[in-house]
Amino acid sequence: MKKLILIAVLIISCSVGHGQVASVTTDKKQYAVGEIVKVTFELNGKYDSMQLPVFKDFEVMGKPSSNSSISVLNGEMIKRESRTYKLQTLKKGRFKIDSPTYYIKGKGFKGKPVKVRVVNPSSKSGKR
């Protein structure tokens, strides 16, 4: 019986932090200089704390909007949280928007970054 309890504890402790999926999405992949990028950070799980990325090539426009939901699937409770930021593009180029770092029991993890292209307003169609 002690072995069974020990095995259960080990399985549960190993699965903490696994199963959470962090994602970064934007409303599109190409923007004009001065246009607003809507970037959403989403996590399907609980976390203890979060550290936002630095938006060095963008200007943050106001406070983020937040959304959270809880659903039950096959008896398992799933929590989703998202934050959407509006970032104004400042210059042309190709830029990477990193995921926040989410911390669960002292361990940090991130989602995959997203890449966007910023062009001059007159070349928004992608032609030069």
Image: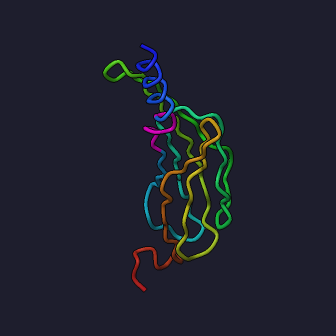
Q: Is residue 17 magenta?
A: yes
Q: Is residue 99 magenta?
A: no
Q: Residue placed farthest to the bottom in the image?
A: 128
Apparent side of residue 80 relative to residue 75 in the rendered image (left or right): right
Residue 122, given in percent of the width and then of the height, sits at 49, 78
Q: How many marks?
A: 0
Q: Nearer the viewer, residue 49 or 35?
A: 49
Q: Nearer the viewer, residue 120 or 9?
A: 9
> Which quarter of the image is occupied by the N terminus?
top left
Apparent side of residue 67 relative to residue 128 in the rendered image (left or right): right
Q: Nearer the viewer, residue 22 or 115?
A: 22
Q: Residue placed farthest to the front in the image?
A: 2
Question: Which residue sits at x=68%, y=60%?
Answer: 59
Question: Which residue sits at x=54%, y=66%?
Answer: 96
**Visual colour scheme:** rainbow
Residue 4, given in percent of the width and then of the height, sits at 40, 19
Question: Which residue sits at x=56%, y=53%?
Answer: 99
Q: Is residue 107 above or below residue 27?
A: above
> Which quarter of the image is occupied by the C terminus?
bottom left
Q: Residue placed farthest to the top in the image?
A: 1
Apparent side of residue 73 relative to residue 117 in the rendered image (left or right): left
Apparent side of residue 123 relative to residue 49 in the rendered image (left or right): left
Q: Residue placed farthest to the left in the image?
A: 74
SS assignment for the magenta stretch, majority: loop
Question: Which residue sits at x=62%, y=41%?
Answer: 103
Residue range (magenta): 15-21
Residue 5, given in percent of the width and then of the height, sits at 45, 18
